[in-house]
Image (cartoon, rainbow, N blue to C red):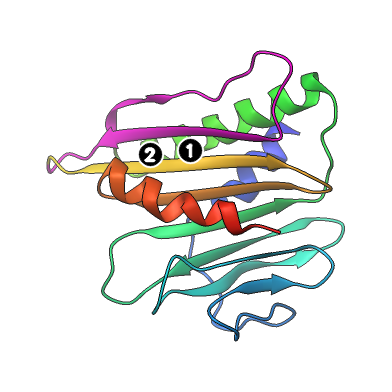
């Protein structure tokens, strides 16, 4: 489970595909995956694109960005429904560790953050963040939410400041 979760999360940070087959993001920059979910973009000029199209057996991953604006938002969809606290704790640990690994792969050091709350009972929406410093002195911040519904959703935002990352990841409130 953890390996699959880390791999799917890692897709979010790789190059993404230019077309959006299967997902409708034409109305008000809202990403809609029929019978799965819909989520707003952070604002005007922001657009969702697929990293890995949703597959009912494998899940999917999407990135939202805007030309000339700092930061990105990622949506990862795991098709499994985690109902037990044990399963949710495993998913949260995997998601947090994936962000930590991503910062390491970007060359960041002094990695810190707020871990997700893994004290039972586990809520349906759990937030956390992680950040690190690059060798040039700049920082990279990830703010994230794991949302447990019929599918498990990761909404993650990356930006040069925690305030920017948290503002971008507020789109999690629009996930339906």
Judge by depth and name the residue closer to the eye, 51 or 82.
82
Image-quadrant location for residue 72: bottom left
Q: Residue at x 52, y 64 (%)?
A: 63
Local packing at callout 2 (Cα closer than 10 Å; few below 14, some 14-19, many 20+) is many
Q: Give the range drawn in magenta.
A: 109-136
Q: Quadrant of the N terminus?
A: top right
Image marks 2 and 1: residues in contact by CB distance under 8 Å: yes
Using the image as rendered, state which of residue 174 and residue 120 is in the foreground. Answer: 174
> Does residue 162 lie above or below 68 as drawn?
above
Question: Residue 100 in the image: x percent, y percent?
Answer: 45, 32
Tell me what residue is drawn at x 67 percent, y 42 percent: 147
- Relative to 83, 148 lies left or right: left
**Is 132 contained in the magenta span?**
yes
Residue reaching furthest to the front: 173
Residue on which the image places disc 2: 103
Q: Residue 17 carries which label?
A: none
Residue 73: % across, % down: 47, 58
Relative vertical location of residue 119 with respect to residue 20 in this rendering, above or below: above
Residue 12 shows up from this direction? no
Q: Of the numbered discs in the image, which one, if any, rests on residue 99? A: 1
What kind of element bears circle 1?
helix
């Amino acid at each position: 489970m953890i390996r699959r979760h880390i791999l799917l999360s890692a897709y979010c940070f790789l190059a993404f595909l230019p077309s959006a087959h299967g997902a409708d993001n034409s109305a008000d920059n809202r990403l809609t995956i029929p019978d799965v979910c819909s989520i707003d973009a952070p604002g005007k000029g922001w657009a969702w694109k697929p990293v890995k199209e949703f597959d009912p057996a494998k899940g999917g991953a999407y990135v939202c960005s805007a030309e000339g604006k700092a930061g990105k938002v990622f949506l990862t969809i795991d098709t499994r429904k985690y109902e037990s606290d044990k399963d949710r704790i495993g998913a949260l640990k995997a998601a947090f560790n994936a962000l930590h690994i991503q910062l390491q792969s970007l060359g960041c050091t002094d990695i810190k953050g707020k871990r997700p709350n893994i004290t039972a009972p586990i809520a349906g929406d759990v937030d956390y963040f992680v950040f690190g410093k690059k060798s040039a002195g700049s920082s990279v911040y990830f703010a994230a939410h794991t949302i447990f519904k019929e599918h498990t959703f990761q909404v993650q935002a990356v930006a040069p400041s925690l305030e920017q990352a948290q503002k971008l990841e507020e789109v999690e409130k629009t996930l339906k």
